[in-house]
Image (spheres, helix red, strand yellow):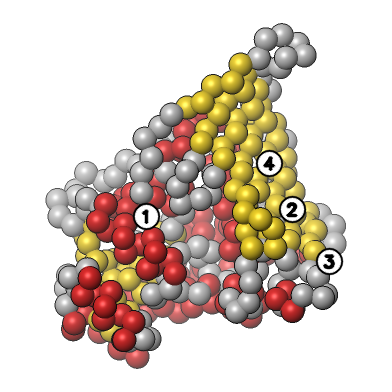
């Protein structure tokens, strides 16, 4: 898989972004990232709480008439300085507002998971084609140098062929939190497990052929009345690679990725975090000869700035991004298969 920090060459101006949804991710990560962006700028906000939105707009130089509520979402069509609509809403609203953004004639960057169902994903892609606009799913780690290097090392077989993968993305999530509501696309697999799913694609360059999953949903904790607390799942790939992934809303933070290869293994700590990645290679085995450990020191980037700048160039040139709707749909299909395995038990095969 090639590095994904390359951008279309036609990046002659900054793309204007309309940010939809002012939750924690927007306020703590996305809005501050614009200060680190070279090709992106915030020009509009969409929020149901104008009292919350106006101080954000003022802090970022956004005009008052560019602060919209959801009832007037369609007014984005008349804002010529808005090139991209960034959907940062709860999962069950992704499809609805992506479709509305395409109706307004804008390009769309949509947070992951792309949508709740595969049918919604398909409608989003169909709408993008009909509008002749670009759709990118916000897989920020495709623009992060440590994850990019790990993927390249695996694709190049720097330590021999990949054999197995271990991916862990766990955190503590407590009510009240929309991610604990099943009817709104919640649950640990869609929220944190999707990082494991997507990382395995980066490492293998393949789509899984089958999945099997187990879950724990404690009956004595009302926070998990609707969704599991923890899910572990195995993915098997056509090459024979097996990935063991685990995700939890009830375990202390752990965001680790290890790839076992024929001649050593690759470790990344904080693999799915917003910062703090560390990448190490272990070559050889002390039982069969000398072994060595090497840490790769790379220059970190602001994940969100890099992601938005990449899509800014894609949008301005109207060129397809790499983390497109097809990738988003593929992950939703894998999530569907995991949920089917949890319901029915046993191995679920995915269509090629």
Q: At x 62% / y 23%, what residue is drawn?
A: 282
Q: Which residue is mark 3?
A: 344
- Do the residues under discs 2 and 1 have CB atoms within 8 angstroms? no
Instruction: Examine the image and state in which quarter residue 250 appears.
Output: bottom right
SS state under label 4: strand
Q: Which dot, 2 or 3, sits closer to the camera?
A: 2
SS state under label 3: helix
Name above or below for residue 124 compared with residue 328.
below
Q: Which dot, 4 or 3, sits closer to the camera?
A: 4
Q: Which dot, 2 or 4, sits closer to the camera?
A: 4
Q: Earlier in the sequence, mark 3 or mark 1?
A: 1
State the image coordinates of residue 64 (x, y, percent, origin top left).
Answer: 18, 82
Distance from disc 1 to disc 4, alpha carbons, whole Å, reads 25 Å
Q: Which residue is mark 4?
A: 166
Q: Earlier in the sequence, mark 2 or mark 1?
A: 2
Instruction: Examine the image and state in which quarter residue 334 appears.
Output: bottom right
Distance from disc 3 to disc 1, alpha carbons, whole Å, reads 38 Å
Residue occupying the far front of the picture:
252
Q: Earlier in the sequence, mark 2 or mark 4?
A: 4
Instruction: Return the residue nearer the eye: 185 or 123.
Output: 185
SS state under label 2: strand
Q: Which residue is mark 2?
A: 233
- Residue 304 is tagged as 1
Q: Earlier in the sequence, mark 1 or mark 4?
A: 4
Q: At x 46% / y 37%, what residue is drawn?
A: 146
Q: Which dot, 3 or 1, sits closer to the camera?
A: 1
Q: Earlier in the sequence, mark 2 or mark 3?
A: 2
Q: Is residue 49 left or right of residue 13?
A: right
């Amino acid at each position: 898989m090639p590095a994904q920090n390359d951008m279309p060459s036609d990046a002659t101006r900054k793309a204007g972004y309309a940010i939809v949804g002012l939750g924690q991710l927007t306020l703590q990560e996305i809005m501050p990232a614009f200060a680190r962006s070279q090709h992106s700028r915030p020009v509009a906000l969409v929020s149901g709480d104008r009292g919350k939105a106006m101080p954000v707009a003022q802090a970022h130089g956004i005009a008052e008439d560019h602060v919209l509520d959801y009832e007037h979402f369609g007014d984005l069509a008349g804002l010529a300085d808005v090139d991209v609509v960034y959907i940062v809403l709860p999962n069950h609203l992704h499809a609805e507002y992506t479709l509305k953004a395409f109706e307004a004639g804008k390009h769309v960057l949509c947070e992951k998971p792309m949508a709740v169902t595969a049918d919604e994903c398909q409608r989003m892609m169909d709408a993008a084609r009909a509008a002749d606009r670009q759709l990118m799913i916000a897989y920020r780690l495709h623009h992060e140098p440590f994850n990019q290097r790990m993927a390249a090392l695996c694709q190049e077989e720097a330590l021999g062929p990949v054999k197995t993968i271990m991916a862990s993305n766990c955190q503590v999530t407590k009510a009240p939190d929309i991610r604990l509501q099943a009817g709104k696309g919640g649950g640990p697999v869609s929220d944190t497990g999707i990082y494991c799913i997507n990382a395995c694609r980066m490492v293998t360059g393949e789509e899984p052929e089958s999945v099997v999953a187990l879950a724990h949903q404690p009956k004595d904790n009302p926070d998990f009345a609707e969704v599991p607390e923890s899910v572990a799942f195995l993915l098997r790939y056509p090459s024979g690679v097996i990935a063991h992934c685990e995700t939890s809303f009830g375990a202390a933070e752990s965001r680790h990725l290890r790839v076992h290869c024929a001649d050593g293994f690759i470790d990344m700590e904080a693999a799915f975090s917003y910062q703090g990645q560390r990448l190490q290679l272990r070559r050889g085995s002390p039982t069969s000869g000398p072994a060595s450990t090497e840490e790769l020191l790379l220059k970190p980037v602001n994940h969100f700035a890099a992601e938005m700048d990449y899509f800014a160039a894609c949008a301005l040139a109207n060129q397809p991004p790499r983390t497109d709707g097809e990738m988003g749909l593929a992950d939703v299909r894998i999530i569907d298969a995991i949920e089917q395995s949890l319901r029915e038990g046993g191995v679920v095969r995915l269509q090629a």
